[in-house]
Image (spheres, helix red, strand yellow):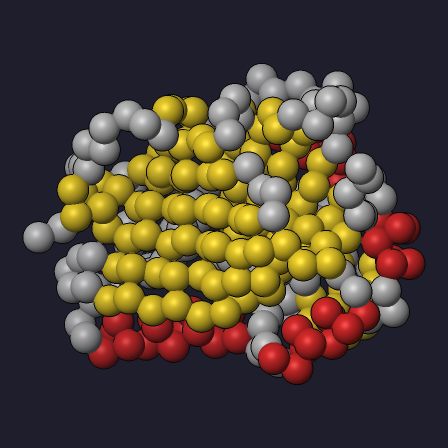
Amino acid sequence: MTVPALSLWKGQTAHARYVPFERRFAYKIAMIDIDIDRLDEADAQTPFFSIDRRGLFSFHRKDHGDRIDVPLRPWAEHMFAQADVALNGGAIRLVTFPRHLLYRFAPISLWYGYGPEGDLRGIIYEVNNTFGESHSYVAAVSRDRSRHVADKAFHVSPFFDVTGTYRFTLRQPDVRLGVVVESLKDDVRLHMANITARRVAATPSALLRTAVSMPLSTIGVTIGIHWQAFLLWMRGAKYRSKPKPPANGATIAVETACDLPRVVKDAA
């Protein structure tokens, strides 16, 4: 069965902070799942979605990859090669937040790299901050449910140092999407964020319902980030200045088994 060039993921993201005090929140989200080699098909699939031009929802090449002039596939293949992942011409699908009208911000985008037979071989966790900077964590995938560990290399929150490790837990997307990102330091879990969603066909009616039911689905992410930061600051969380971004645009994450004992503990 041929997978459509474009589909939707509708669900929620949840966040939990554990230090120096506990705080939890969650909100609804809508993301797109697009085959980067079939952008023309995605553009023609529905009148409410467009490629590289304005629309109710849209995808722009310049929002991803090196953001300069390298086409998306060569950029992604270069990233995968750094983690010894060879796709041999297999599909690359990008799960991300689309532009909604004129606004777009994606805290994380997920690049799924497949082999010719449809086997998932690699993942790029493309992380963005609100300063317009981006960094990618790249890993090989050999299991239906994988866990990856990488040294933190990129500034995301002014309330956490760029030290410690990230632990990514990923399930292969089918009708459900599941991703967990944990921030760890000295075997203590500082923060956790997850995305859970179900796949929805990208029909005109589905996109219209998304626009009506979640009118702030994109800009709302940014508003939520700044609102939560304000609440943390009001509670006395220590603010840290933004360091320079890393010179290297990618960090390699190491795959570990999900059934290994968890050696981390939540902060007391």
Q: Is residue 55 above or below residue 59?
A: below
Residue furthest front in the image: 1
Q: Residue 213's x, y, as percent?
A: 61, 80
Is 234 or 68 nearer to us in this picture? 234
Q: Is residue 199 above or below residue 111?
A: below
Residue 6 appears in the picture as rendered: yes
Q: Residue 170's x, y, as percent?
A: 47, 39
Is 11 or 24 nearer to us in this picture? 11
Residue positioned 19% across, 32% down in the render: 263
Is 81 or 96 nearer to us in this picture? 96
Quick check: 244 left or right of 69?
Answer: left
Residue 248 appears in the picture as rendered: no
Residue positioned 54% across, 48% down in the render: 177
Quick check: 50 left or right of 30?
Answer: right
Residue positioned 90% across, 50% down in the render: 40
Q: Residue 190's x, y, as percent?
A: 24, 50
Residue positioned 67% across, 59% down in the render: 200
